[in-house]
Amino acid sequence: MSTACVRSSQVIACGDDRKISEFVKSATAREVGTPGMRVQQLLLSNNDKILFAGTAEGLILSYIWGVEGLITEGPHYVVARGNVTRMATTPDDCILFVTSEDGTVFQ
């Protein structure tokens, strides 16, 4: 399981069930499925509005992580040939950096 963020009462995680789940106060608040994708890394943007999911297939999935439980699927990006190992954004969320197991660094 990979954890994107842990705040006072919020955890966003993914597991072997191929779902990204948000837990608030130990209860599931919302879920989104990633059929056929093995999510390895999660990153919630600094402004808490976009969730990035890095997969074992070298894809970056993006989701608009809206208020009141709304989730909108955004664009997907092919960034590598292997497992996404780390992701980070600049403080203003303008640039996403991704590294992968095949040595790729994507910006």
Image (cartoon, rainbow, N blue to C red):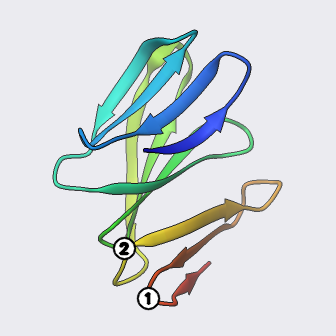
User: 16 or 22: nearer the eye?
Assistant: 16
Type of amino acid at the residue the image marks with label 2: Gly
Query: Residue 95 falls in which quadrant of the image?
Result: bottom right
Residue lying at 78% horizontally and 62% vertically, measured from the top left: 90
The percent coordinates of residue 96 (x first, y second) are 64, 66
Q: Is residue 30 left or right of residue 86?
A: left
Kindly check if marks 2 and 1 are in contact, taking CB atoms under 8 A apart as contact: yes
The percent coordinates of residue 106 (x first, y second) are 56, 81
The percent coordinates of residue 102 (x first, y second) are 44, 88
Type of amino acid at the residue the image marks with label 1: Asp
Q: Secondary structure at mark 1?
A: loop
Q: Is residue 28 left or right of residue 24?
A: left
Which mark is drawn over residue 4?
A: none
The percent coordinates of residue 69 (x first, y second) are 46, 17
Tell me if residue 93 comes above or below residue 63 in the rendering: below
Residue lying at 34% horizontally and 41% vertically, measured from the top left: 15
Residue that mark 2 sits on: 58
Residue that mark 1 sits on: 102
Residue lying at 60% horizontally and 64% vertically, measured from the top left: 87
Q: Is residue 28 left or right of residue 87?
A: left
Please identify the quadrant where the N terminus is shown. Answer: top left
What is the tally of numbered marks visible in this picture? 2
Q: Secondary structure at mark 2?
A: loop
